Image (cartoon, helix red, strand yellow):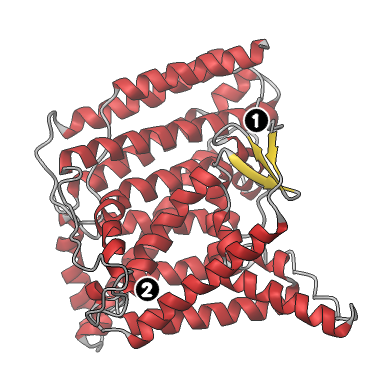
Amino acid sequence: MSRAANRLALSLMTTAGVVAAAPAAAHAHGLVGRADLPIPEELFVAGAAAVLVVSFAGLAVLWPRPLLERVRERRLLTPPAVADVALGLLGVLLFGAVVYAGLAGTSTPTANLAPTAVYVLFWVGIPVLSVLLGDVFSALSPWRALARAVGWVAGRVARGRLPEPLAYPARLGHWPAVAGIAAFAWLELVRTGNDDPRLLAVLALVYATVQLVGMSLFGVEPWSRRGDAFGVYFGLFARLAPLVRRHGRLALRAPVAGAATLTPVAGTVALLCVALGATVFDGFSQGALWSSLAPDLQDLFRSAGLGPGAALELTFTAGLIGAVLFVSGLYHLGVHGMPRLAGEGAARRFVHALLPIAFAYVVAHYFSLLVYQGQATVFLVSDPLGDGSDLLGTADRQIDYGVIDATGIWYVQVGVLVAGHVAGLVLAHDRALVAYGDARQATRSQYAMLAVMIAFTTLGLWLLSKANG
């Protein structure tokens, strides 16, 4: 084993040991009340900050050269071509089932498959699967599968004489994806009646239509990599996975290392700031501070002539925008604290360090939602329309809330938050070594980033501890 590999292994072992010895994570999405914690919340915050500082010091000593710019991959196997067809067909069938349930099933959200499928299995489950197994969404994407199928048939009919797609404009970058994720966040966190199954089904059809139009104009793969909001969003998380598919072959790589291969384009920084800001606001909106601020803001909008519903939605819209701007400002503050690298170029250059943090926020915030409401899938798939059917014989199953208690959720979530921020420090430190070419200068450049990581960790713990606390 090389000296660099030895240092990497020792650094990771040291970090893992400190994380394992530290306290671990919190309450998610307001589904369960926070239990009395075994030690004060301030000690959790202090412990998390100490882990980051120790990790930073360990990186400065044990990681003097960049190790992640060239990620080593070990080839595993080449999946058969029929696997792509089968997975694409599965994605189309699942999409059709959810849309049909939303349109034809009961309007009661808890009895209809569509809301759980969209907000739990899709929005939370796919990121988790992406980090574990790689880019699963590109294989299951129903609109990508349909577009590829239509393109294959059209190519056969036209005998290869199809017009070339338009070149995807570089200035667009990820901005269509930013708009899509922002719209979904607004739907989830702001719109009244956002769990209406019929509404979700109609919006799913509208979104799929937009994707098919985009793919027909710019090509399936260019649009999937840039314009498909969910394809881009889930694909970013897939860069953290130990599995990657390249040139049709599955390969194994070090976890998190794939984030270093991200090539940011216009809108990439905004996309991650929107994703992080939405999760921050979701947690903040469940706490006492927002509950004290929101009524005054709503009264202000009502005094301007808006009705109660519109004023409420505008209040939450303002809160969502404020959270996104706060996250963006915090990240840019860390970037501008780096000597000679301030500016949008530096923001793009280090944005991959936000990937594990964004994933940590998703898991920490939605962990209880996934653990508890995810169990509802067992009985909802047996009665997807909520009409009393029992297709699989599991319609009478119930959610087991004893699978993990609130204190256990807290420990899991703190651990995820700390681990995600340590991974962000590793990625930022490795990129700084490339940018500055000198270990000492690179370490000094990361002081501001360390402060930002501690701020993000403290913010995450505060949100989790105060939500419905």
**How far is mark 1 from mark 2, CA to CA?**
37 Å
446 shown above or below 220: above
Q: Position of residue 58 (x, y in %)?
A: 48, 16
Residue 293 location, quadrant: bottom left
- For image coordinates 12% across by 30% down, the residue present is 38
Q: Secondary structure at mark 2?
A: helix
Placement of the N terminus among the 4 image quadrants? top right
Disc 1: which residue: 68
Dot label at residue 189: none
- For image coordinates 36% across by 37% down, the residue present is 416
Q: Position of residue 369 (x, y in %)?
A: 27, 55
- For image coordinates 73% across by 50% down, the residue present is 248
Disc 2: which residue: 187
Check whether the beta carbons of the residues at disc 1 and disc 2 lie within 8 A of each other: no
Residue 325 is at least partly visible in this image: no
378 shown above or below 388: above
Q: State the count of labels.
A: 2
Earlier-in-chain disc, 1 versus 2: 1
Instruction: Give the crowd class for mark 1: few <14, some 14-19, many >=20 residues within 10 Å.
Output: some
Seen from the viewer's position, the closer of residues 252 and 457 is 252
| Amino acid type assigned to the residue bearing label 1 in the image | Leu
334 shown above or below 212: above
Q: Secondary structure at mark 1?
A: loop
Q: Position of residue 444 (x, y in %)?
A: 55, 23
